[in-house]
Image (spheres, helix red, strand yellow):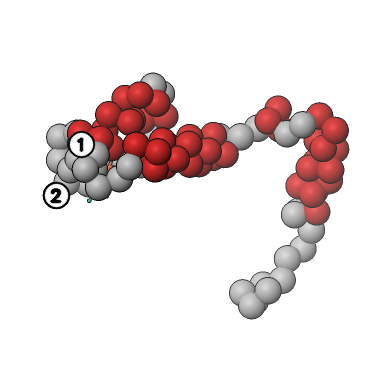
Amino acid sequence: MGTALSLHVPSVREQPVGQLFNTITNGVRKMPAYGSQISVEDRWAILLYVRTLQRSRNATLDDVPPEFRDQFALRQQDSNAPRRTDARG
Ligand code: HEM
């Protein structure tokens, strides 16, 4: 089996959701079809999740509701504070 593309590459991000639905349903090139194993409703649910992951990976401050942007900026400054170096949190 070939290597599946990252869902974050532009060629997948920019696809209409109907094309992604077709990919799950009927497969594409080396990807098998899942239409007979995943219900229509679940296929759409998977695509909503894929779209959420794609969008969150590319989020900017403009995606944050205006009333929360100040808080977000503060948290970003906090993250520049010195950090613990051990990994045990
Ligand atoms: C059900 C959730 C899945 C979604 C939403 C999904 C979505 C996609 C998308 C969008 C692509 C890129 C297609 C394109 O280039 O236009 C792709 C490719 C691929 N997927 Fe999936 N996939 C799913 C499940 C799977 C599973 C379970 C497998 C493996 C058993 C798989 C194997 C592959 C492979 C091998 C490719 C590369 C196909 C090729 O270019 O030859 N996918 N998938």
Residue 34 x %, y %: 24, 43
Q: Secondary structure at mark 1?
A: loop
Residue 7 visible: no
Q: Mark 1 packing: few (<14 Cα in 10 Å), some, or many (20+)?
A: some
Residue type at the position of mark 1: Gly
Visible in this render: residue 33?
yes
| SS label for mark 2 | loop
| In-front residue for pair 48/78 | 48
* Depth check, front residue: 71 or 52: 52
Q: Quadrant of the C terminus?
A: bottom right
Question: Which comes sooner in the sequence, label 2 or label 1?
Answer: 2
* Mark 1 sits near ligand 1, with its Cβ under 8 Å away: yes
Residue beneath disc 1: 27
Would you say 35 lies left or right of 30 here?
right
Q: Confirm or reject: label 2 Cβ below 8 Å from ligand 1.
A: yes
Say which amino acid is labelled 2.
Answer: Met
Is residue 58 depicted above or below 71 in this figure? above
